[in-house]
Amino acid sequence: MKITEKENKIVIDDVKDFEITHIFDCGQCFRWNREEDGSYTGVVGKNVINVKQEGSRVIFDNVSMKDYEMYVKNYFDMDTDYGLIKTMINTDEIMDKAICFGSGIRILNQDEWETMISFMISANNRIPMIKKVIENLSKMFGEYIQEYRGRDYYAFPSAEKLAGAGVDKIMECRAGFRSPRIKEAAARFLKEKDTVYSLKGKSYQEGLDYLKSYCGIGDKVANCILLFSMKQFDTFPVDVWVRRVMQTLYVDKDTSDKDIRSFAESKFGKLSGYAQQYLFYYARELNIGK
DNA sequence: CGTCAGGTCTCTA
DNA sequence: TAGAGACCTGAC
């Protein structure tokens, strides 16, 4: 990897295991949108970033070297060796295909608070709708960041803002029946944020139990939060796509989510979360099991 | 119109 | 512990 800085851009050459379409479409994030030129623009914290890829060259626009070192590198998990991970979970022909198909997937390091609320919104919802709700909430309650390529961007709302928001206003963002839970979670998060931010360093089980004690966070959502923002990779979130691909390719059709999860966690161990991402992307893009 | 979506909660047996 | 229904919303 060779990194150069120019005109508010960071250009990195010879990047391995990195494919923006795989990264942004593997179900882990909701704030990135494709531009006409094939690049993606998204919000990370209080920053707007545009990512473009030309082969093994990755260009981060609206990013200085300082920004890159401070948060972009970590957000895109640039120091993790995905080649090694892929080798370790490539245990059979199914995984080989899935890994090949989503070869450029990376698990982003997202903020705990944003991930908690985002995945609460994902419950019984569709991706375009989830993205819309988050955008609405950010517009209504988030801090204005800047205009980029003719569009206004807002940060994800703070817990203070959402805790103080009227449920009717959250409803206006089309969060539906999740609205009161969002407000409630925000109020609780405010009091317990130190606990939440400490979960990264605690055990998977401890994190799972804590998160599930929130109203609106069940098994699937808790596992997503653990995987996408708390570096707990020994988890295997089972959603409808993962259920389909597992029931089609690995286990009986009537296997419960819980059994699918334990099957996968014993098969992939500490790397279950990575395996889940390749399988999810594979299943969803190819419509496996539907 | 009904069905259903990257689930969770509540109630019942 | 397991199964059945309800649930905001909007797209088909």
Image: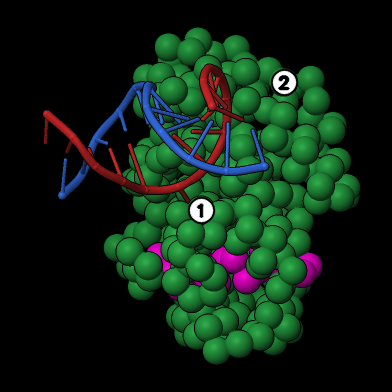
Chain colours: A green, B red, C blue
| Amino acid residing under circle 2 | Arg
Q: Secondary structure at mark 2?
A: helix
Which residue is found at the position 51% from the left and 68% from the top? Answer: A252
Query: CA separation, marks 2 and 1?
Result: 26 Å
Screen quadrant of the C terminus of chain A: bottom left
Residue A188: mark in rendering: 2
Q: Position of residue C3 (x, y in %)?
A: 48, 40
Which residue is found at the position 37% from the left and 51% from the top? Answer: A149
Residue bearing the label numbered 1? A239
Left or right of A39? Residue A277 is right
Q: Position of residue A85 (x, y in %)?
A: 71, 79
Left or right of A67? Residue A53 is left
Residue A234: in sight, yes or no?
yes
Q: Earlier in the sequence, mark 2 or mark 1?
A: 2
Which one is nearer the viewer's eye here, A190 or A38? Answer: A190
Residue numbers of the magenta segment:
A269-284
* Image vertical order of residue A78 relative to residue A17, above or below: above
The picture quadrant where one finds residue A231 is bottom right
The picture quadrant where one finds residue A46 is top right
- In terms of secondary structure, what is the magenta stretch mainly? helix
Which residue is found at the position 54% from the left and 70% from the top? Answer: A251
Which residue is found at the position 40% from the left and 54% from the top? Answer: A33
Which one is nearer the viewer's eye here, A99 or A39? Answer: A99
Chain containing the residue with disc 1: A
